[in-house]
Image (cartoon, grey):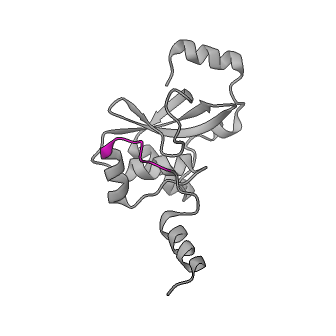
Amino acid sequence: MPSDTNRRLNIFERRGWCPVRYAHHPKPIKDALRKLGLRPQIKQCFANSQRFFMGATWLDLEYYEGYITTIIPMPHGWLLWEEQLIDLTLDYGPDEIEYHGSTVYTRDEVRKNMVRTMQWCVMDDRVLHSHHPRSDEIEAMRAEGSR
């Protein structure tokens, strides 16, 4: 009989160190996550979204990068499916987080970035290295209705 420690390590090995809950997503998204054997991890927004985007080719997904605003603005990656925002990393409702300044990428662009960098990472380094939006810039993005 495996020890409790071995049992927990086996769970971490299967699910990842810090899995994110995904029960709140639409059934086709949950089914695709299961089919692909993906378990989104915290603090891995770009990898979570890109891996799912590239794997679930039968779903009409769009991959976005930009900023989210919770308490502070931060770079983030997310998906859009049938006009629904799909955030595989954060399990807040769409009304609790604001999504701004997004750029949409194709599967070919994500594939080329993966081949070039050999990792699932931010597509445009300017998202990470430029300044985070100031409050007046966020207000302008809100006025534009960016999402």
Q: Residue furthest left?
A: 58
Q: Where does the image place residue 106, in percent across and percent down from the top left?
A: 40, 40
Q: Quadrant of residue 35?
A: bottom left
Q: Where does the image place residue 47, in percent across and percent down from the top left?
A: 52, 51
Q: Where does the image place residue 135, in percent across and percent down from the top left?
A: 70, 19
- Mark count: 0
Query: Is 77 situated above or below 18?
Result: above
Query: Is 80 situated above or below 6?
Result: above
Nearer-the-camera pick, 137 or 27:
27
The main secondary structure of the magenta stretch is loop
40 relative position to 132: left or right: left
Q: Residue at x 68, y 25 (%)?
A: 133
Q: Residue at x 52, y 51 (%)?
A: 20
Q: Residue at x 49, y 50 (%)?
A: 21
Q: Where does the image place residue 79, in percent across and percent down from the top left?
A: 44, 38
| The magenta segment | 21-27
Nearer-the-camera pick, 45 or 15:
15
